[in-house]
Amino acid sequence: MSDATQNGPMLAADGRPLKASLRRALRRQKMRALMLIAPLLIFILITFIAPIADMLFRSVENNIVSDTLPRTVEALDDWEYASGETPGEPVFDAMFVDLFIAAERKEHTRLGSRLNYQETGISSLFRQTGRDVEDMAEVYEDQFDALNEIWRDGAFWAELMGDPDWFAEAQGAEDAGPRFRINDEMEDRLPRTAEAYRVFARFTQNEDEDNPASERPWPLVHAMLYADLTDGAAIDAYTGFGAEELTAAKEAVPGFEAPTYREAFLEVDEDWASVEMWGTIKAYSGEFTSGYFLNAVDRELTPHGIETLPSDQSVYLKLFWRTIWMSLTITFMTILLGYPVAYLLANLPMRKSSLLMILVLLPFWTSLLVRTSAWKVLLQQQGVINDILVWAGILSDSGRLVMINNQLGTIIAMTHILLPFMILPLYSVMATIPPSFVRASKSLGATNWTTFWRVYFPQSVPGIGAGSILVFILAIGYYITPALVGGTDGIFISNRIAYHISSSLNWGLAAALGSILLAAVLVLYWAYDRIVGIDNVKLG
Amino acid sequence: MANSDTNDGFVVFDRVQKSYDGENLVVKDLNLSIGRGEFLTMLGPSGSGKTTCLMMLAGFETATHGDILLGGQPINNIPPHKRGIGMVFQNYALFPHMTVGENLSFPLEVRKIAKSDREAKVKRALDMVQMGSFINRRPAQLSGGQQQRIALARALVFEPELVLMDEPLGALDKQLREHMQFEITRLAHDLGITTVYVTHDQTEALTMSDRVAVFDDGRIQQLDPPDVLYEEPKNSFVAQFIGENNTLEGVVKEMRGDVCTVELDGGEIIDAKPVNVAEAGQRTKVSIRPERVEYNKERLQEGAHTLKAEVLEFIYMGDIFRTRLRVAGNEEFVIKTRNAPDQVKLQRGQQIEIGWLPGDCRALDA
Amino acid sequence: MKLKTILMGSAIAGVSSMAFAQDMASDMTLVSWGGAYQASQQKAYVEPYLEMNPDVSITWDESSAEAVAKLRAMNEAGNITWDLVDVVASDAIRLCDEGLAMEIDFNEMLAEGDDGSSAEDDFGDFIVSDCYIPQIVYSTAAAYRPDLLPEGAPAPDSICAFFDTETYPGKRALEQRPINNLEWALLCDGVAKDDIYDVLETEEGQDQAFAKLDTIKDDIVWWSAAAEPPQLLADGEIVMGSSYNGRWFSAIEEQDQPFEMLWDAQVFDLDGWIIPTGLPEDRLARVMDFVRYATDTQRLADQAKYISYGPARASSAPLVGDHAELGIPMGPHMPTAPENSENVFVYNYTWWADYRDDLDSKFQAWLAQ
């Protein structure tokens, strides 16, 4: 064999190394395969993986606090909740700036509702203060106005604070004009004013699409100018544009009426003195938080650390357990009721089994609400079943059974709804069990029961496994049926998830609850794999 | 070896009928007596009723009419698991969730046999089929032939007196099948077990059985030892179904004791042995086995008929030659000749004369 | 000369209004609740508006129940497909807080009352959020079946009948949420109406309310869809229940059910429009045009012909007439009618905006106990 005796790599007919040739051929095959599954892959990525990733992210994401209140978060670094005292002036100063900007951007109420999940009352505190924060700043605007009307003039401010080149371009420019650039000298001399003005200018350009060169700045800028000037801003050596007005202002500011922001805030609402409130802001100032997950397991991240919620507020762990054990009960019920039906389906002659199959699938063709309402009509105390039992004399009229608006109702209705998901996999597995196994067993001397238990049943276990996984996973995610027939003790964790998604808008908590549910399913799946073996799951 | 003379009627079908739908009979008036230790094969095309008979015997189907007796006792009302009949299925029906050992142990467990006895019996049964080392394997890890042996061992392990086999070799390749045919007959004879074997493969039936029951249309067409069946088919169905056969159609001209004269449709007149023709004027199918036809004049025996024939096809098959001829208008007339040193090789288109002894030529029903 | 100027002027005005009309989108998606309520909106102002603007087409989306979540999702995706959304007041506050609803300048954007009052005055106290244009006042009120009461029991005249299981045995249906129920519990536990929210703000007050609810916990059937209580009452599953007054009206007047209203301590709530933020200019222009028409005095009064909810404008009240099909005067069926509103409970939206999350989790925990 000439190939084998050659030294070096084996070559293909065209002289290329055989290995490379093979790899090329295989790669082409793989690419083709990949192309074929690409649409599905992309679809799954977009509709399944991405939402799950998003959910996992949302359950810990918390940058709304640090994004909306960056200065406050920084200032709070120097404050300890344990001190038991309201934070000092610098925190209030920072909060004033943050809240003013947030109010302009209409973000303060959003932050308020976020923090309200943790500390009741913050929502209206932020809403109210956001309304009044402009007034706090106008105190300064008015006094600068009174001093010199030029302080009301947008163009003056733009020339003072803007980079000279920018100002030259911006003057008379249409729409928003060129992108704002700050005057570096002003940034050194009046740092806080410059920062406030820059925020204003950018906001004016981006959100309002106006030219800052002709817009009167926010009162916040005046307030910051006051702050810079009273802090002894170095403008004595300044000789550029507006030096005269600045100098005059610097001389005048000590005479300004200027309540501290702390006073102003407390005047709006005395809750601003609440240590708890500040502690909550500090506790939730990180970009990520474990808060949602803690809430989801009846814990709470408070300024003192992690606390267990009192029993009159803890509901989630209880609901998790209930969801899991009720789902297991429902799964067990579907096995109990579905197994004989599936057996019949697999063993009846074709025509009869087709008819039975239609009956099994019938629930699929009726809307969920109709089915659930039908159960109400049947199960309620004045319902059909109770009426029949009373009529038959089995029950007294006063002793009517309570079969709905409780756990029993949920189990009955959901067993019915999920039954096809058990029957179908069971049937498809049973249909593959050859009748000769049963005959063989009987011919070997086994009774009907032994035959079933030792020969037929073990072979149908993969169907039970597949059906159980299907039913269980569907069951723990159900919320419409439990909401309609579950009353108070028959509702599931999914009902709370739905509530937080659609009503309370606490998506972070909903995501955390959903993640825990997902983890629970994965753990159970893993346990199933360990105990039964996932190979033992067959859909047919 | 048992035959009808010594038949003690261990298994008896007495006027058994079976219908599934109440309109058509699948088994029509079956009468059959099987002797203890006999190896009986039920042979027939699919739908001939042979499997139904086996299932009735096993207890998985009930007879619509008539009695089935086992060892003299009617068993119609005995459920299958109490009949104590071993059975081997076409697809082996080894329980996939049990090991080989557990499969074999199963019939012993349900009979509540003590554990030590069970182990001994399982081992003996496995050794019997040379599968002793596979005791811990699962059926899925075995080849078809191995599974077949295990199925056999399982059917025998509880020492039944009667074993039923439903086309047990159907799924094996030719070589393995021939080997297993031998194994099964050897075991059946060694153990002295009565065996009822169902197959549609006539070679299998001929090589394995003491007697063969040829089924067609719900009836036993002929029940005889293989050699009788082959050489003396009682009707044209059996002649056609068993082995290769040439058929010439014609009308009986004259009956002369154990010889009759037949005028073939082509006008030729031949002599034949009347088997189930009764009188002159009846239409008949004359059957001649291919290996009983000779074309080498030197080999033609005394008293042989001759007919003109044209060679249509000549196939060299090593040990034999197979030649297709046109004879009396029949273009599917086949002859087989042994590859002997003096044998003449024929050419296509060659005109020859063929001949046979009248005794080899059987006039059967049309 | 003068006439000519006027003609010229009106011609120019016509042209400019034409040009203006071209800047308005011709499609509009309205979101509402479906059912009888949406039908009343359709008849009272959508159909007339379409008659005036034949080139406009309006699509309904019956998603109001999930409007808050859906709007947030749309906003995150950056694709707002709704133009005008009908929500209850508490949802409007939430949407406004989240920045998902546009702020409304009432006097600028809405028609003044036909009595000449400014829009802001006309809506008055019903302006509960900067983003919310109220349309109707509905109430959560109680009803009972006299034939199911024990013999000799007096007809209930107070909401506290719910808590009196001795005089009125049987099940009662309440909405599965803390709002209204906690207030009623305190009211019937002797707390003065004006003090209720102050009391409810404290731990002790909350405990007191839950303790009161505890006394009837086993007798309550909780509902989550307003259609349930009339059905339950009709089936005889309950002896009394709370639901929206419009549902009771339709059960009593349209379906002749033998129910009696129990207006005591009915809780007013609002239903109205919000406009999502971030609409493109042409769509916004169309929405503003529609809203100005749909919330004027006559249109809100017209709506009451089809459903027994009171118009949110004070100026509409005198114009409320007869039911469009039954022909009965609608006035006495309005929750705002004087004889019905002798004892009205005013639902404090802003208070609940703060306490809803907290009390809801307590309520759920209480339910689960």
Image (spheres, coloured by chain):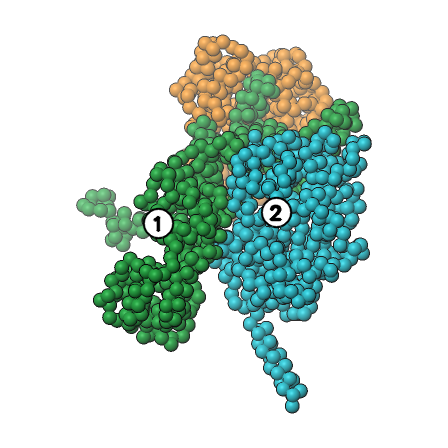
Chain colours: A green, B orange, C cyan
Report x, y in % for residue C209: 59, 35
* Quadrant of the image occupied by residue A235: bottom left
- For residue A434, side relative to residue A71 (left or right): right
- Crowd tier of the residue under label 2, counting other residues whose Cα lies within 10 Å: few below 14, some 14–19, many 20 or above: some
Residue A330 against residue C299 in the figure, above or below: above
Above or below A194: residue A506 = above
Provide residue B77's location: percent of width, then percent of height: 68, 17
Please name the residue shown 29% across and 57% down the image. A231
Look at the numbered disc 2 and give the secondary structure of its residue.
Answer: loop
Residue C51 against residue C124 in the figure, above or below: below
The chain identifier of the residue carrying mark 2 reads C
Q: Nearer the viewer, residue B222 or C42?
A: C42
Whether A401 is drawn above or below A277: the answer is above
The answer to whether B108 appears left or right of A205 in the picture is right
In the foreground, A406 or B117: A406
Numbered badge on residue B105: none
- Report whether residue A106 is seen: yes
User: Image check: C39 left or right of B91?
Assistant: right
Question: Which three-letter amino acid code belongs to the residue tagged 2?
Answer: Tyr
Q: Residue at x 50, y 24 (%)?
A: B95
Residue at image coords 59%, 56% = C127
Q: Which residue is mark 1?
A: A89
Foreground mark, 1 or 2, reads 1
Identify the image quadrant of residue A185.
Answer: bottom left
Residue B171 appears in view: no
Q: Which residue is mark 2?
A: C347
Taking the view exactly as shown, the residue that stands out farthest to the left is A7
Q: Secondary structure at mark 1?
A: helix
* Amino acid type for the residue under numbered disc 1: Glu
Q: Position of residue A484 (x, y in %)?
A: 63, 39
